[in-house]
Image (spheres, rainbow, N blue to C red):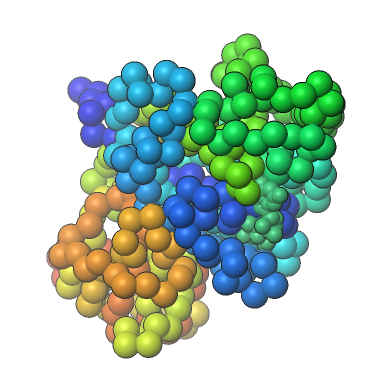
Amino acid sequence: KNMSFDNLRSPVVCVLGHVDTGKTKILDKLRRTHVQDGEAGGITQQIGATNVPIDAIKEAAKFVKGFAELAVQVPGLLLIDTPGHESFSNLRSRGSSVCDIAILVVDIMHGLEPQTLESIKLLKDKNTPFIVAVNKIDRIYDWQPNAKRDVRDDVKCQSKIAMNEFTKLTNDITVQFAEQGLNVALFYKNPDPTEYMSMVPTSAATGEGMGNLMALIVEYSQSMLAKRLMYSNELQATVLEVKAIPGLGTTIDVILVNGALRESDTLIVAGTEGPIVTQIRSLLTPQPMKELRVKNTYIEYKEIKGAVGVKIAAKDLEKTIAGLNIAVANQPDEVEFCRAEVSHE
Ligand code: GTP
Ligand code: NA
Ligand code: MG
C-alpha cells in the first residue's frame, strides 16, 4: 500500500495529571481563554476538547528555536482536558483511551502525586507516549520569568539560587519517574526520544515554556506517530459527554478521531436501555481555540472529518452512555449490524 504522510489528521492530545497541577490553566494560556476561572471551586469536573489550528500553534511557538524551519504536516491539535480530582478516574480513563499522545502535568513543587501515578498507569497500559510539563516554575525562589524567548534560554538566564533549586527539583522528579520504571529527561538534554520521555519546564501563569511544549508535541507526533496519524475513512469516534443544551436538547460531545460525519447520517449509539438509532440533526463545533464543554456560539457543518471535537444534536440521545464508540449506518440494512457493533462494547 502506498504510504502517504501528506494526509495526517490532528493528533488527539490528552492533558492528564494530579488535581491543581495547572492542566486547565495551561490550555487557557494557549487559548487566551479563562475557563479555569469559571470552574466551581477551580476544579475541572468534565472532559473538555479544544480544536487548535496549526496557525495558533505556530504563533504560540514563535520563540522556539528551529520550529519555524520545521515542515509542519499536522493540520492542528485536538486537546483534551481531563479532571485531576481523585473522584474522576473514569473521566481520566475515558480521555486517555482516545488519545494519541499525552501531556502529563506535574507541579514542580510537588513532584509525582497520587493521580500522577494513576495517570502513568493509564498511559503505560495503552502504551501511549507522553511529554511531561513540569509546571509552575514561576514559583521557584528568585525566578525571573521571560516568556518571550525559548524556555531553554529562559532557564539559562536564571540566578544561581533559582537555577540550583530548579536543578534539584527536576532531578528529584526524574528520580521519581525512574522509580516508576520510566526514563525522563529535560527535553534539551534528552539523549534519545525513543528511550526517554521529554520534560518541559512551563508556567501557565507567565506563559514560559508553552511554545516549547506545543512544538515538542508537534515534532514528536510527526516523527514518531506519523503512521498512526494517517487519516483513515473508517469511522472512529467516542462519546465524551452527554449534555442538555438549551435550544438544542440533549447533545453528545464526541471525539471524532477518523472518518467523517454528515448531517442527517443515521447514527447508532449505545444507550442504557440498548442501542439508540437516530438521525444527526446538527454537527457543531465551538470556534477554534474555544472549549467544547463551555457554552458558546457554535459553527455548524454539513460534513466534518476527524480529528475534531464535535457536538452532535439529535433526537433520543438522553440515554446515551458516555465513553463508548458510535457507529453510522450508510445503508438501511447496515442498521442492524451497527446496533450489534455498539452493543458489543
Ligand atoms: P483540575 O482540573 O481540578 O485537576 O486542576 P488543573 O490541573 O486543571 O489545575 P488548574 O488549571 O485548575 O490550576 C490550579 C491552580 O494553580 C489555579 O489556582 C491556577 O491559577 C494555579 N496555577 C496553574 N498553573 C500555574 C503556574 O504555572 N504558576 C502558578 N503560580 N500558578 C499556577
Ligand atoms: Na483545578
Ligand atoms: Mg482543570
x and y, in percent, of residue 74 in the image: 32, 35
x and y, in percent, of residue 12 in the image: 44, 45
Q: Nearer the viewer, residue 312 or 107?
A: 107
In the image, residue 345 above or below residue 268: above
In the image, residue 162 above or below residue 94: above
Name the residue: 52% across, 28% down.
Answer: 149
Q: Nearer the viewer, residue 139 or 22?
A: 139
Is 29 positioned to the left or the right of 68 in the image?
A: right
Q: Tell me, yes or no, if residue 218 can be seen here.
A: no
x and y, in percent, of residue 309 in the image: 37, 58
Q: Tell me, yes or no, if residue 149 can be seen here.
A: yes
Q: Nearer the viewer, residue 311 or 271?
A: 311
Name the residue: 31% across, 40% down.
Answer: 55
Image quarter of residue 254: bottom left
Q: Residue furthest top?
A: 191
Is 206 positioned to the left or the right of 173 in the image?
A: left
In the image, residue 80 above or below residue 169: below
Image quarter of residue 243: bottom left
Quadrant in which the N terminus appears: top left
Name the residue: 57% across, 19% down.
Answer: 193
x and y, in percent, of residue 278 in the image: 27, 78
Is 69 positioned to the left or the right of 209 in the image?
A: left
Q: Nearer the viewer, residue 244 or 208?
A: 208
